[in-house]
Image (cartoon, rainbow, N blue to C red):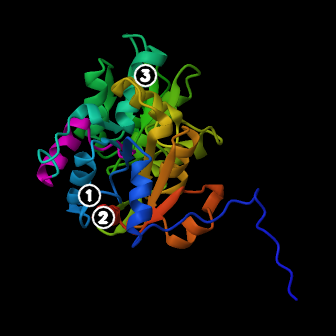
Amino acid sequence: MTQTHPADPSTPQPPPKLTNNPQALKTFIDQFDTFLFDCDGVLWSGPQLLPNVRETLLYLHSLNKTLLFVTNNSTKSRASYLDKFTSLSIAPSIPITTSQIFSSSYSAALYISRILRLPSSKRVYILGESGIEEELTLAGISHFGGSDPTENRPLSDADLETFGPDPTVGAVLCGLDRNLNYRKLSKAFHYLTHPDTLFLATNIDSTFPSHGKLFPGAGTTAAPLVTMLGGREPTSFGKPSLAMMDAIEAGTGGFERSRACMVGDRLNTDIKFGVEAGLGGTLAVLTGVVKEEEVVRGEGGVWAGAYVETLGDLLKAREAEE
């Protein structure tokens, strides 16, 4: 007779796949009062809303769930994200305000203004786009670089003579910069050679999903500087950094973490964030970065609480209510 042995309880088990299981989906949803959603790869891909997302959010709203939107994408401000929710007809069907939207650029602005308390005499040099600029401006933080068109001028020998450490620069803040160039990297590097200049990043995602594909993420903006600085890493404010949770709790007034679920398409950012923040649950979706086999084997030692193929699968929970 073949002898069987119970599974080692210390070994994590593959998370359950809830797709096509209405009762399991309903039970899962009923555990939580608050849902935190990543955006790119979960709600939409580029300009396209993913299937049944609007209907799913409406369903959760009808159950009186609190919906929060937590993104590492720093290229848009919270106001710009609200415009996108409106353009995709999610709002005003669901009453969404900027107080429900948390981006890595907002998290960075909160940290710089409230934690670092950067003196008004200090400026932040931005490697990034308008979303960072808008959030820093709203927080009253002096900044330069970013989308300034002069940052895209051809580099001359005369320019090289002007680059160097600057005591008025309090921090270099890196985000996704789709116009990254040698001028920007050179200036940032020299600013960071000053011993008091902080090295910050909105997030360090290696890729981000758009148009059904993967593209370089914000981590690729900071990576050349890490190399130039001999391996010095930036302080990051996006998921999985708990600085993002500090921003969420500051913006919402707090919520019961044990009754909250993080929904995302990346294990090493979204799901790890939910786990390390002590949320009651995490849900991985397969419409963005992570593949099913990675979820099942807990890639990188990160285990989702459960997973579905698409966010729209949650709608099937209604079948268990009939």
Q: Residues within 10 Å of mark 2 (few under 14, many from 20)?
A: many
Q: CA distance from mark 3 to mark 1?
A: 36 Å
Left or right of 33? Residue 274 is right
On screen, residue 21 above or below 40: below
Which comes sooner in the sequence, label 1 or label 2?
Answer: 1
The image position of residue 46, as x and y in percent, is 26, 60
Numbered disc 1: secondary structure? helix
Write down the residue under mark 2: 312
Write down the residue under mark 3: 112
Instruction: Tell me what residue is drawn at x 39 percent, y 73 percent.
Output: 20
Label 3–label 1 contact, CB within 8 A: no
Which comes sooner in the sequence, label 3 or label 1?
Answer: 1
Q: Decide whether residue 192 is among the magenta residues.
A: no
Numbered disc 3: secondary structure? helix
Label 1–label 2 contact, CB within 8 A: yes
Q: Decide whether residue 79 is among the magenta residues.
A: yes
- Is any part of residue 224 visible from this angle? no
Q: Amino acid at mark 3?
A: Ile
Q: Residue 305 or 199: which is nearer the viewer?
A: 305
The image position of residue 320, as x and y in percent, is 34, 64
